[in-house]
Image (cartoon, helix red, strand yellow):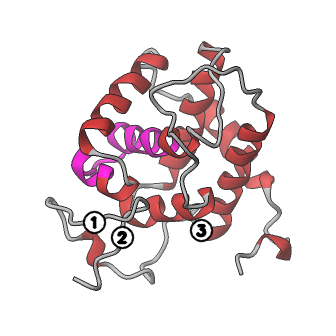
Amino acid sequence: ESDIPLSPMGGHIMPSDCAMLAQSDETEAEPGTSPAFIRSLSVVLTHLVGVSQNNGIVTRFHAVRPPQIPLLDYLARIKHYFQCSMECFVLALVYIDRIVKFHPEFQISELNVHRLTVTAVMIAAKFFDDHYFSNAYYAKVGGVPPREVNLLEAYFLNLINWQMYVAPEEFALYRDHVLRAVPAADPTCERG
């Protein structure tokens, strides 16, 4: 039991539908999901949190208090355990941006960015990848109760009007934006 990683909320992860958690951190990363890419995505999402104005509107995605796990660590956790393609992280960013475009009153904050992200990547994996996991598995990885993940997924899909397709040009635009967020050679971005 000691080798079972804890979820971000402190509970044990015990997936029922796969042995993905047994894989080591040394597995070869999908091109584009390198630590530098995940770090850049974290910078982009953190920037979105920073530019949002708190309008007091609380959504289903809001937590009572900011999660203890930093967004960068949360993204790295999702990358490792979801085992989804790099495209899913780009699609997730597109989906989150669509929510803001379709619903200008919706604000990304430190109270909702984690749940938005885990839900967006989960939806992207289900839409884009050939292989994906159950919502119960995604819930355990994300530290969110399974019933809540189901509700978040339905709410998210309604917010984006079920528009999950992303044109190649739009995909390239968002991918390039993430890649430019943090120059690869910037030593200040390394985790200590």
How far across and how far down the image is residue 131, in percent? Answer: 27, 51
Quarter in which the C terminus is drawn? bottom right
Q: For residue 90, which quarter of the picture?
A: top right
- In this picture, residue 144 sits left or right of residue 1: right
**Circle 1: element type:** loop
- Disc number at residue 34? 3
Which of discs 3 and 2 lies nearer the camera? The answer is 2
Q: On the picture, is 136 further left or further right than 71? A: left
| Residue at which label 2 appears | 6
Lower sequence index among marks 3 and 1: 1
Mark 3 neighbour class, 10 Å CA radius: few under 14, some 14 to 19, many 20 or more: some
Amino acid on which disc 3 is placed: Ser
The residue drawn where x is 31% and y is 36% is 148
Q: Is residue 139 visible in this depiction of the protein? A: yes
Q: Earlier in the sequence, mark 3 or mark 2?
A: 2
User: Mark 1: few, some, or many residues within 10 Å (few <14, many ≥20)?
Assistant: some
The N terminus - image quarter:
bottom left
Residue placed most toward the observer, 105 or 30: 105
| Front residue (pair 28, 151) | 151
- Could you say which is closer to the camera, residue 117 or residue 86? 117
User: Which residue does the numbered mark 1 point to in the structure image?
Assistant: 13
Tell me the quarter of the picture where residue 151 sits: top left
Q: In 3D space, how far apart are the residues under numbered discs 3 and 2 (Cα atoms)?
A: 23 Å
Whether residues under marks 2 and 1 lie with C-beta atoms below 8 angstroms apart, the answer is yes
Q: CA distance from mark 3 to mark 1?
A: 24 Å
- Callout 1 amino acid: Ile
Closer to the N terminus: mark 2 or mark 1? Answer: 2
Per the rendered image, the range of residues in magenta is 117-139
Give the answer, above or below, for where 25 lies relative to 165. below
